[in-house]
Image: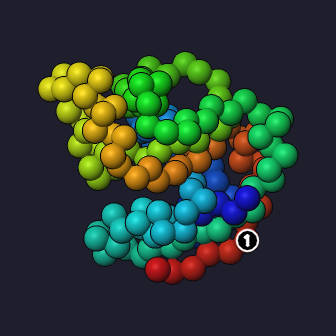
Amino acid sequence: MILYHGSYIEIQRPELSFSRDNVDFGKGFYTTPIYEQAVKWCGKFIRRNKNGVVSRYEFDDNAFEKLKVLNFDTYSEEWLDFILVCRQGKDNTDYDIVIGGVADDKVFNTVELYFDNLIDKEEAIKRLKYEKPNLQVCLRTQKAIDYLRFEGSENV
C-alpha cells in the first residue's frame, strides 16, 4: 500500500517523539493513501509561508496481520467516541495503527458541536453520514512505523 504524509519538510524516517498529542487518533505518525489529502495537509504550512512537502512511503500490507489495528470503515458512534477520547488526551488503548475518517473542515465543525454538547450523538452521526470521508492511517507505535519504506518526496 502506498501512503503519503503532508508536511513542510521531507520525512524519511518518522519519529513519534515529534508527534502531537490530543489529535484525532492520538499521538502517532499520520498518513493517508489519498495523495490529494496529503497535499491538503500541506496547506496549513503553505499558509504560514513554509514549504509544502508530500513524502511517499510503501507500507508492507503484511503488517495488518501482525499488528493491533483499529479500523473505522465509516463515520460512526464508535469513531466519534474514539476521537473524543483521543482529543481529550484520555486514550489508553494499545493499537499500533488506527484507520478512519479525518475530522476536518465540515466534519470537524460537526464534531465540535457534539463535543460542546450543542448537538447530541444521534444528530452528529446523521450529519456525518452526508460527508465524504477522507482517510487517515495513524501509525501509533515504532513497530508500525518499521513497516514503512520511504520512497521519496516532492514539493507541492
Name which residue lies at 51% across and 73% down: 53
Residue that protrudes farthest toward the left in the picture: 118
Question: Which residue carries the number 1 mark?
Answer: 151
Q: What x and y, as percent, mark residue 87?
A: 38, 31
User: x, y percentage for residue 137?
Assistant: 59, 47
Quadrant in the picture for residue 33 = bottom right
Q: In the rendered view, tell whether residue 81 sits above or below residue 127.
A: above
Q: Is residue 91 visible?
A: yes
Residue at 62 percent across and 31 percent down: it is 70
Up-down relation of residue 5 to residue 82 (above or below): below
Who's the residue at 34% across and 31% down the image?
A: 125
Q: Amino acid at mark 1?
A: Glu
Quarter of the figure that contains the N terminus = bottom right
Q: Residue 117: name its quadrant.
A: top left
Q: Nearer the viewer, residue 141 or 37?
A: 37
The residue lying toward the viewer, choosing from 140 and 117, is: 117
Residue with the most extreme bottom position: 155
Q: Position of residue 92 (x, y in %)?
A: 55, 19
Q: Residue at x 56, y 56 (%)?
A: 32
Left or right: where 107 falls relative to 74:
left
Would residue 30 be visible to someone looking at this image? no
SS of the residue under disc 1: strand
- In the picture provided, is 145 more to the left or to the right than 62? left
Circle 1 crowding by C-alpha within 10 Å: few under 14, some 14–19, many from 20: few
Tell me if residue 21 comes above or below residue 152 in the rendering.
Answer: above
